[in-house]
């Protein structure tokens, strides 16, 4: 069944500091959409608004899951997760003193996910063989790339319908960034997910994105209806290619 998300005229702030202003975007069923922008332009704040961690001052965020619309504004993060929306947060936010396997199991607390624990765990270990090799290792003792694999796996243990990925490339070497982006594509296709990915690495993000938005100073500055449109846009060239 199809899942999508629509953000309409969202404003958000931390105290008196306005971070997001009049942001509208959509992610249609089965799409991978990139939210592109350099640090400090509001990408992570928008992700937190979707998940109920930050409450917008104005605007609507509506998830359509299996034909039923849910207004996310005002819902708690727990309620939003229970709808089938999962976040891979910036910085991974693992439980460092728990093992790989324990971190994965904590991702499966959602009632709908509990019946799929074995199948999802098996696929996580198939997609990320290093996690299988190190399932008894403490998460905090792993490399950055391994921790990012674990963060993705933990989100997938929730059996989500919509996956939000916030800055998956942060702190990773270029080769690991490419592998991580490839893994997001693989997981999206296997689980037929709808994906919104916030990323500042333009080159890697557009490899797997169907289309994308560029956010500058908390506002959507450009909507690219395809990867080609993003690649050929003057603003994108200025921000990411120095042209």
Image (spheres, grey):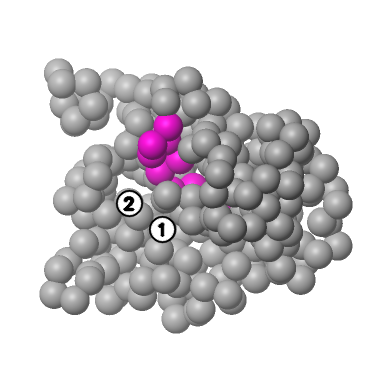
Tell me the residue at 13%/75% (across/down). 16
**SS at badge 2:** helix
Look at the picture and state if 68 lies above or below 205. Answer: below
What distance separates the C-alpha of mark 2 from that of mark 1? 7 Å
Pinpoint residue 175: horizontal percent, then vertical percent. Answer: 47, 20
Question: Label 2: which residue?
Answer: 43
Horizontal side of 215 relative to 205 (left or right) equals left
Q: Quadrant of residue 242?
A: top left
Look at the picture and state if 179 lies above or below 56. Answer: above
Find out whether residue 3 is within the magenta segment: no
Q: Which of 28 and 118 is in front in this view?
A: 118
Q: Quadrant of residue 122?
A: top right
Which region is colored magenta? 163-172
Pinpoint residue 224: horizontal percent, then vertical percent. Answer: 35, 35
Pinpoint residue 147: horizontal percent, then vertical percent. Answer: 55, 42
Query: Tag on residue 47?
Result: 1
Disc 1 packing (10 Å; few <14; some 14–19; many ≥20): many
Disc 2 packing (10 Å; few <14; some 14–19; many ≥20): many
Tell me the residue at 22%/71% (across/down). 14
Look at the picture and state if 170 lies above or below 57. Answer: above
């Amino acid at each position: 069944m199809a899942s999508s998300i629509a953000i309409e005229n969202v404003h958000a702030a931390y105290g008196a500091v306005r971070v997001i202003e009049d942001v509208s975007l959509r992610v249609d069923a089965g799409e991978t959409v990139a939210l592109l922008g350099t640090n400090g332009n509001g990408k992570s704040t928008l992700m937190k608004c979707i998940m109920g961690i930050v409450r917008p001052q104005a605007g609507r965020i509506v998830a359509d899951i299996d034909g039923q619309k849910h207004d996310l504004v005002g819902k708690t993060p727990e309620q939003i997760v229970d709808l089938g929306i999962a976040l891979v947060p910036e910085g991974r936010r693992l439980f460092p003193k728990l093992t790989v396997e324990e971190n994965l199991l904590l991702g499966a607390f959602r009632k709908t996910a509990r019946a799929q624990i074995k199948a999802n765990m098996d696929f996580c270990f198939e997609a990320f063989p290093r996690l299988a090799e190190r399932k008894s290792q403490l998460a905090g003792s792993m490399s950055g790339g391994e921790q990012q694999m674990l963060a993705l796996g933990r989100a997938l243990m929730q059996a989500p319908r919509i996956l939000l990925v916030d800055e998956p490339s942060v702190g990773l070497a270029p080769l690991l960034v490419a592998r991580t982006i490839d893994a997001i594509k693989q997981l999206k296709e296997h689980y037929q997910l709808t994906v919104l990915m916030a990323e500042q690495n333009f080159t890697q993000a557009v490899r797997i994105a169907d289309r994308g938005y560029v956010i500058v100073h908390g506002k959507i500055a450009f909507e690219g209806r395809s990867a080609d449109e993003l690649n050929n846009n003057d603003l994108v060239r200025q921000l990411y290619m120095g042209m």
